[in-house]
Amino acid sequence: MLVNLTPADVQDAQGAEQIIKAVRQRWHFLKHLFAGSAYDRGRLMSQAAYRDFVM
């Protein structure tokens, strides 16, 4: 399990970047990500692709 707490002034998309990085470091074998509509899809997909995820 991974929990990432951020201050209220951190937007969901920014927090997601931190989570993507942490997930890749801990579970290198994961390939798929699922995200809700609150995230900046273009930015999130770019970060996910950079870290070899499929969305």
Image (tube, grey):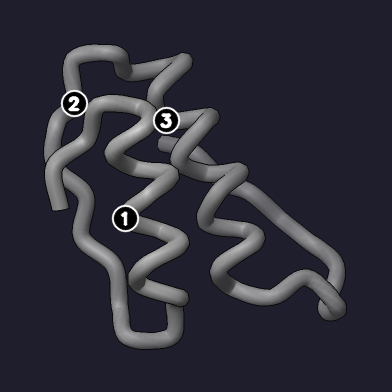
Q: Secondary structure at mark 1?
A: helix
Decide: few, some or many residues near mark 1? Use Cα within 10 Å; few <14, some 14-19, many ≥20: some
x and y percent of residue 11 in the render?
A: 69, 75
Type of residue at label 3? Val
The quadrant in which residue 27 appears is top left
Task: Judge by depth and name the residue closer to the eye, 55 or 50.
Answer: 50
Kindly identify which residue carries mark 1.
Answer: 45
Which amino acid lies under the numbered mark 1 shown in the image of this protein?
Met
What residue is drawn where x is 43% and y is 85%? 38
Give the side of residue 54 with respect to residue 48, left or right.
left
Q: Residues within 10 Å of mark 3 (few under 14, many from 20)?
A: some
Q: Do labels 3 and 2 touch, CB within 8 Å?
A: yes
Query: Which mark identifies residue 23?
Result: 3
Question: Picture coordinates of residue 51 (x, y %)?
Answer: 36, 27
Q: Is residue 5 above or below residue 9?
A: above
- Is 19 on the left or on the right of 1, as rendered? right
Which label's residue is closer to the chain start, 1 or 3? 3
Question: Which is more toward the observer, 32 or 26?
Answer: 32
Image quadrant holding the N terminus, namely: top left
- In this rendering, position of residue 14 left or right of residue 20: right
Under circle 2, the secondary element is loop
Q: Which mark is residue 15?
A: none
Disc 2: which residue: 30
Marks 1 and 3, how far apart at CA: 15 Å
Q: Are marks 1 and 2 in contact (CB under 8 Å)?
A: no
